[in-house]
Image (tube, grey):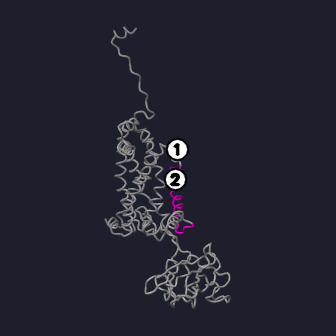
Amino acid sequence: MASDTAGSGKVPAAPRPRRSVTGTRPSVAALFLLPALLLLGALVLYPIGYSVVRSFSDQSGNGFAGLDNYQALFTDRGIRTALKNNILWVVFAPTVATALGLVFAVLTERVRWGTAFKLAVFMPMAISMLAAGIIFRLVYDQDPDKGVANAMWVGVHDTFAASSAFPKAHPGRRSPLRPAGGGAFVTKEPVHAGDAVVLPLVGVAPDLMPEGAKDAAPPKPEPGRAITGTAWQDFTRGKGVGRLNGVDAGELGYGGMRIEAVRGGRVVASTTAADDGTFTLPASADGALLRLPADNFKEAYAGLNWLGPSLVTPAIIAAYIWMWAGFAMVLIAAGLAGIPRELQEAARVDGATEWQVFRRVTVPLLAPVLAVVTVTLMINVLKIFDLVFIIAPGSSQDDANVLALELYRKGFSEDQPGIASAIAVFLLLLVVPVMWFNIRRLRREVRR
């Protein structure tokens, strides 16, 4: 049978290819594409074209404004601030998020609970920008009792530099103390050995006194030997009860108050009041003035103003990184899974350290993935709007301004649609080259 076929010179016919659903008629293919093309034109092409046309129109939209709207991009103070902040966003946010994602992806390969860690890091991606903005608005609250960031910062600060327990204390009426400048107080008259000095202060609420404060004790004179005294909270002043500038029952001592003896502008002796407010200075302080240094009355450290003009942009960038570091980690971990392990093992066999393997083998092999992640995040941060709008308070929103937010403000708050359209076109021009680079790299990877 085979010989008959060979002898006849006939070649078996190839199987007929299966025809596609649309056949070979372009009209059928166009019919299927028509809904998508209509949506593309209505939702993408028409808005872009209208924005371009509107960017050359005046505020009313009826007159031709030429390049005036584009000139405003570089002369308007708000837009220049937004452009500067966008540069900071593009430089730092994608770089830091990608670097953290790389570190997380590499390190989680070496721990058994790596999957749980990846889930925790990626979880913020499930939160909307609105919810994340509200969360970080609370995190950055100025009050350490509400804001987590300041609670941690104040806790660390107070570990190394304790704040005063009497920030609002001050001398009362007819007090033997007077202001000495810089927040300190000094006695009006010099003191001498054997004197029993009273230093009454007011201004600290009873519930704000230190927990270890005890009932104030009257000073006991030590003639010729030392200077004694009491610093206490004279609560009953002006209430018709007790003695003015006198220690009464129930009044608390200023335990921990620092007292200095100053003579000729120089501190000759110093001491700290006991829990009942009493203190003792040596006889060498004879003829000196007693001074309560300003450190006794400095306000408690309240932390940083995270949403103030100088820190608001870095604070919002940190919130963005918290959300998107998980995205970078997942993509990099996927790329890391495709790296030939024998290359890393060969480097280790040749004596390379783990840092050398990471820097000279792992990172170069991950370069295409890192580039895609970085470029994708760059496109994303060029359009950032909601985080800035929600987190930045009204007092510092101008300092945190970005182009997308300025577009919204110009278009809706300030009724300048021409400038808003120019900003939109400018953003498009910034995004297009980055998108083109990303698409080109993705196609190159597919061809490989």
Please rate how many residues cluster around mark 2, counting C-alpha atoms within 10 Å: few if below 14, some from 14 to 19, many from 20. many
Which residue, as the protein is rendered here, is positioned at the far front? 224
Label 2 sits on a secondary structure element that is: helix
- Dot 2 amino acid type: Pro
Q: Is residue 26 magenta?
A: no
Q: Nearer the viewer, mark 1 or mark 2?
A: 1
The answer to which of 308 and 263 lies nearer the viewer is: 263
How far separated are the C-alphas under marks 1 and 2?
Answer: 15 Å
Disc 1 residue type (three-letter): Thr
Taking depth in this image into account, of 336 and 210 the one nearest to the observer is: 210
Closer to us: 365 or 294: 294
Residue 124 badge: 2
Image quadrant where one finds the N terminus? top left
Magenta stretch secondary structure, dominant: helix
Name which residue lies at 44% across and 53% down: 43
Q: Considering the image in quadrants, where does the C terminus appear?
A: top left
